[in-house]
Image (spheres, rainbow, N blue to C red):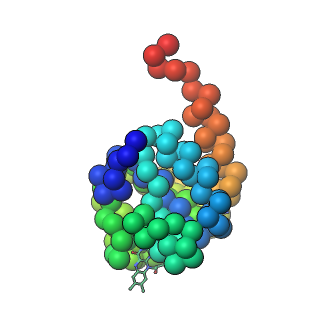
């Protein structure tokens, strides 16, 4: 809902593992369902998949959300410099040995292209709290 990356309570992060600009569709949808924004690694901005304004890290924005969901991001030290202030980190990565997995409170070993659409579907099917 227009929250800025620096002040968002939820940030859905995408890295090289997202694979392409188009691959960000499900991440955008997940961020929207969670009332958050999308943040990315430098690889993603270097590839031109996303603008530099969305980069998290030493040479990007420093974020302090309640939840950082790091998808397909290895966890390089220059990236951690930007997300170390997150209260909780959930990592989704095909590589259980990726440094981000060790930083995370919860680590999901899996393909983000399967895990994120499943999450989106589960959130969409949530019963409305308004009843
Ligand atoms: C001076 C300097 C400043 C820098 N500043 C920044 C900065 O501000 N921000 C920043 O982010 N980086 C910065 N970097 C770059 C940093 O060192 C890394 O190169 C970068 O963070 C790596 O991005 P990545 O994690 O997206 O890619 P990679 O390191 O290539 O990691 C991709 C990850 O995706 C996983 N993966 C692949 N496919 C899938 C899949 N289908 N599902 C799930 N997981 C998958 C892989 O297992 C891997 O762990 C800087 C570097 C330097 C030298």
Would residue 87 appear left or right of 89 to someone viewing this image?
left
Instruction: Report the number of numbered marks.
Output: 0
Q: Position of residue 70 (x, y in %)?
A: 50, 59
Q: Quadrant of the N terminus?
A: top left
Q: What is the residue that sits farthest to the top in this orientation?
A: 131
Residue that appears at 31% across and 65% down = 62
Asked whether residue 97 appears in the rendered view, the answer is no
Would residue 29 appear left or right of 8 to someone viewing this image?
right
Residue nearer the viewer, 27 or 67: 27
Residue nearer the viewer, 107 or 66: 66
Q: Position of residue 38 (x, y in %)?
A: 47, 55
Q: Position of residue 108 (x, y in %)?
A: 58, 54
Q: Position of residue 65 (x, y in %)?
A: 34, 51
Is 87 rendered above or below residue 55? Answer: above
Asked whether residue 36 appears in the rendered view, the answer is yes
Residue that appears at 59% across and 57% down = 24
Place residue 113 in its image quadrant: bottom right
Residue that appears at 50% across and 73% down = 45
């Amino acid at each position: 809902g227009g929250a800025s990356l620096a002040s968002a309570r939820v940030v859905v992060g995408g890295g090289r593992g997202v694979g392409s600009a188009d691959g960000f569709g499900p991440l955008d949808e997940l961020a929207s369902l969670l009332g958050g924004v999308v943040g990315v690694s430098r690889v993603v901005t270097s590839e031109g998949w996303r603008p530099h304004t969305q980069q998290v890290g030493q040479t990007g924005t420093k974020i302090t959300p309640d939840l950082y969901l790091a998808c397909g991001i290895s966890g390089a030290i220059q990236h951690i410099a930007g997300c170390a202030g997150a209260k909780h980190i959930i990592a989704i990565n095909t590589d259980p040995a990726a440094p981000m997995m060790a930083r995370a409170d919860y680590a999901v070993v899996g393909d983000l292209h399967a895990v994120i659409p499943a999450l989106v579907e589960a959130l969409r099917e949530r019963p409305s709290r308004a009843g």
